[in-house]
């Protein structure tokens, strides 16, 4: 079971925490199978730098399925995130962690990097609980409802257009 070895080798990893002048604490959860695709060419280091303009990243997790390559897991770690290797669909695990962040008094902003409409209810629950919300996604397929529900939205352009809007 190679995914168990991957999980055990990274279970003690904690992302580095950088200080920002904003004083806002952010919990960032990344939908790896949805966003870390070759067609999007997402650079997590650039995403982290952009999000740090909003505040301090206190939690930075990238959810990956059991088929994630060692190279991808290593890249996630090297870019300062905790890889969360899960069996099956990552959405449920990501939703559970998001719900925990919503109820964590140390987190001010819930940031989700995904394109999925399935996370729409979490954005609304976060707002109902006084949390700021930020959604990072990419086209094509970035849910309009998800974009419109968040306090702030970042749309990553495809590798053909590497700028961020």
Image (cartoon, rainbow, N blue to C red):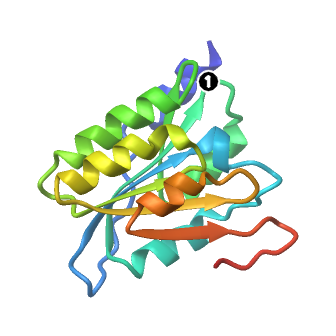
| The residue positioned farthest toward the right in the image shown | 160
Task: Quickly name the residue at label 1.
Answer: 66
Q: Is the residue 3 above or below the residue 152 in the image? A: above
Residue pictured at 83% horizontal, 66% vertical: 159
Q: Is the residue 80 above or below the residue 11 in the image? A: below
Give the left or right position of residue 39, taking residue 8 as reference: right
Q: Residues within 10 Å of mark 1 (few under 14, many from 20)?
A: some
Q: Position of residue 11 (x, y in %)?
A: 40, 34
Pick the residue in front: 82 or 137. Answer: 137
Q: Is the residue 47 above or below the residue 135 in the image? A: below
The C terminus appears in which quarter of the rendering?
bottom right
Pick the residue in front: 77 or 135. Answer: 135
Q: Position of residue 37 (x, y in %)?
A: 75, 48
Q: Is the residue 67 above or below the residue 121 in the image? A: above
Q: Quadrant of residue 33?
A: top right
Whether residue 56 is visible to the viewer of this picture, yes or no, is: yes
The N terminus appears in which quarter of the rendering?
top right
């Amino acid at each position: 079971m190679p995914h168990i070895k991957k999980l055990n080798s990274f279970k003690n990893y904690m992302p580095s925490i950088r200080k920002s002048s904003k004083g806002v604490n952010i919990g960032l959860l990344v939908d790896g199978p949805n966003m870390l695709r070759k067609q999007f060419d997402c650079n997590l280091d650039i995403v982290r730098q952009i999000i740090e303009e909003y505040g301090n990243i206190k939690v930075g997790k990238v959810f990956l399925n059991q088929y994630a390559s060692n190279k991808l897991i290593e890249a996630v770690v090297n870019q300062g995130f905790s890889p969360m290797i899960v069996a099956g669909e990552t959405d449920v695990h990501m939703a559970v962690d998001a719900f925990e962040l919503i109820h964590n008094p140390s987190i001010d902003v819930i940031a989700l990097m995904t394109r999925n409409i399935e996370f729409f209810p979490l954005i609304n629950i976060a707002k109902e609980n006084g949390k700021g919300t930020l959604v990072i996604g990419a086209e094509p397929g970035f849910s309009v409802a998800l974009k419109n529900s968040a306090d702030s939205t970042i749309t990553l352009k495809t590798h053909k257009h590497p700028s961020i809007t």
